[in-house]
Amino acid sequence: MSERSPESLIAAVQRLRGEIAKRIVGQDAVVDEILMALVAGGHALLVGVPGLAKTLMIKSLSDAMQLEFRRIQFTPDLVPSDITGTEILEESGGGARAFRFVHGPVFANIVLADEINRAPPRTQAALLEAMQEHSVTAAGKTMKLPEPFFVLATQNPIEQEGTYPLPEAQLDRFLFDIRVGYPTEADEISILRTTTGKRGAPIEAVFSADDALALQRLVRELPCSELVLTYAAKLVRATRPQEASAPGIVRQYVRWGAGPRAGQALILGAKACALLAGRAAVSPADIRRVAMPVLRHRILPNFAAEADGVSAEPIIEALLSHVAAPGSALPA
């Protein structure tokens, strides 16, 4: 168990950001959302075109933490046992034979599922089961995964041929859907400068598994007022076109809205946001900060939205304008 104080843990997260910045230029919002998902105890899906350092970002995070890291490159011929592990028959010196289970790469603290949509559905399901249960069942035995257990999956949004898109029910297992965009011009010049010259300073580990677990406990203990809980519930309910509170854009363009798990993700994400900012309670601004990564993969646009080129993002922006935030949700 971590012996650090809450203030020391939050300061360690700030140092963690600094270590990641040794390799990653810009992308501050993406790094913040990854850290929020980590301390909230959830998993994250990173979506971005090739060459935006998604894999390097995740590897840098693991290097800055004293956590075991594994990368799984998803391919069409990957089978579930390639992820979870398999039994092998071993023969001892005396001639006796016995089966031994060899752990797969999922037995790690941080698992990078690279291009998760390239593997067939049964292989995706094997990983997603481990994400939900934090355990693997094989050869009639259930084996717990190491804690903390954090899956970061990547997807390429522009190359869909020969891929297996994740079904909505499996997307719902991810706490955040994080979009990685192109860098600014200044950041891109800095990337060219730092990656084509001498190698920079190595990343130092400033965070341990106990620290991560302690932060996850602090997130759960952070107070959240009834006003904030009500605000999160109203936001989620307004995504459902059959609800009376749904705005016109939802009725016009949404086929299915978000379920109760979205509300849980909003609260946990908002608590993580408040904690990493050094605040002792959750505000409506924290809910609004995490609304986009929480809701964008939980709202299913209909055919009219596709025909008109309307994605989930403008629908969420309209929701945030439509559902009034409470004036103050901090306890007196």
Image (cartoon, rainbow, N blue to C red):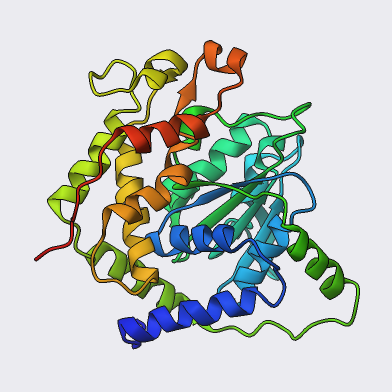
- Seen in the picture, residue 139 relative to 323 is either above or below; the reply is below
Identify the residue shown where x is 38% and y is 62%: 273
Q: Choose top left, top right, bottom left or bottom right for residue 103.
A: bottom right
Q: Choose top left, top right, bottom left or bottom right for residue 6.
A: bottom left
Identify the residue shown where x is 72% and y is 30%: 163
Q: Can you give x and y, in whole percent of width and height, for residue 56 in the image?
A: 72, 63
Q: Is residue 141 left or right of residue 80?
A: left
Q: Can you give x and y, in whole percent of width and height, for residue 48 in the image?
A: 69, 45
- Seen in the picture, residue 240 relative to 8 is either above or below; the reply is above
Identify the residue shown where x is 73% and y is 84%: 202
Identify the residue shown where x is 67% and y is 54%: 89
> How many labels, in total?
0
Q: Can you give x and y, in whole percent of width and height, for residue 152 in the image?
A: 58, 54
Image quarter in which the C terminus is found: bottom left
Q: Is residue 107 left or right of residue 274?
A: right
Instruction: Report the front residue among 7 and 252.
Output: 252
Q: Is residue 283 visible?
A: yes
- Outermost residue toward the left in this view: 332
Instruction: Report the front residue among 196 and 106.
Output: 196
- Seen in the picture, residue 258 relative to 38 is either above or below; the reply is above
Q: Is residue 174 visible?
A: no
Image quarter in which the N terminus is found: bottom left
Q: Can you give x and y, in whole percent of width and height, for residue 315 in the image?
A: 45, 29
Q: Is residue 132 left or right of residue 22?
A: left
